[in-house]
Amino acid sequence: MGMLIDGRWSAQDQRIASGTGAFVRPESSFRSFIGAADGVYAAQAGRYHLFANAGCPWAYRALLYRSLKQLEPLLSISLTQPAAGAQGWTFGEPEALLGALHMHHVYTAGQADFTGRVTVPVLWCKQTQSIVNNESADIIRMLNSAFDDCAGVSEVNFYPKDLVGQIDAWNAKIYPAVNNGVYRCGFAQSQTAYDEAFDLLFSTLDDIDEHLGSNRFLCGERVTEADWRLFSTLIRFDLAYHGQFRCNRNMIRDYPNLWPYTRDLYQYPGVAATVDVEAIKGIYYGSREPRILPKGPVLDFAQPSGRA
Ligand SMILES: N[C@@H](CCC(=O)N[C@@H](CS)C(=O)NCC(=O)O)C(=O)O
């Protein structure tokens, strides 16, 4: 995948790898918050727009929260095609809000001389014509509460005060080992880097599976942000990471607790409609030639979980 340099698309892939061949994810560039004390981005219905890709686990978090919080009427979206091409993420035809054909046009519309990677998700402000934030962890935090005073928005809170410590601790464990861990397996440039990422990934999944033997969700009885961040990776695991990223010690459906837990979350109101299996296969298997998507595995996420 290319990147923008001084506002110009460069097709050269300058993915940053450390000297050891380990994949290092760059920091996100835009980190403003809707509803912050500076008052720049007020929480107003219809003012913001989300650019996303339904296959991408990071963009998916934002799409998932949009559905969980019933934000559809006040937060419009543009979806890129699942697979990237020579111009990076593309909409196939100009999307409705800015008329952007490629995702890099959105970045330069917000900042004409932008240098950096062109990632999704992007939270866009229609009023100031600028990118508010392109870090999914921030975006879901905002969506969790920023619009709670707007009509029709669900008041469910996935980051409740009394569980903040536990949620943060799970996120700190799961992000490097699992969410980014599958990428560290898939994008490793050396055997050692892959082996390390693989071992940490599966030892962490083993720990979580054991924990879920006596807890319905990561923090007990309540679904929290930590569950949704984990779910965004688990739902893609057997469909893509197991094959394409060589995360193949076993599948999620082999785990006694992780597999019913994944189905339990899938069956939470508003979730099933956000899971696009073709887009998930499309982003991982369709982004390189020949664009052939695997037919399997066939997974029944709707099978009762027995965990209620
Ligand atoms: N830290 C970012 C990462 C987003 C990200 O890396 N998205 C991928 C899609 S799965 C992307 O756009 N990659 C393009 C690139 O790295 O050039 C977030 O969580 O929002």
Image: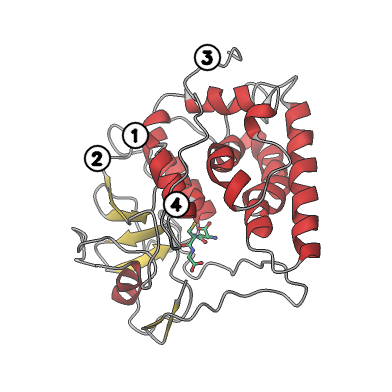
Between residues 286 and 258, which one lies in front from this camera angle? 286
Q: Which of the 4 image quarters holds residue 249? A: top right
Q: Are marks 2 and 1 in contact (CB under 8 Å)?
A: yes
Which of pointers 2 and 3 lies earlier in the amino acid sequence?
2
| Residue type of the residue flagged with mark 3 | Pro
Q: Position of residue 61 (x, y in %)?
A: 48, 45
Q: Is mark 4 within 8 Å of ligand 1?
A: yes
Report the residue marked by disc 3. Answer: 304
User: What is the distance, in whole Å, between disc 3 and disc 4 at their CAs?
Assistant: 27 Å
**Mark count:** 4
Image x and y of residue 277, in percent = 42, 39
Name of the residue lying farthest toward the bottom: 6
The CA distance from mark 1 to mark 4 is 17 Å
**Circle nearer the N terminus (3, 4):** 4
Q: Which mark is residue 73?
A: 2
Q: Are dots 1 and 3 in contact, CB under 8 Å?
A: no
Please tell me whether residue 118 is drawn above or below residue 41 in the rendered image.
Answer: below
Residue type, mark 4 in image: Ala
Residue 275 pos. (x, y %): 42, 36
Residue underneath mark 1: 70
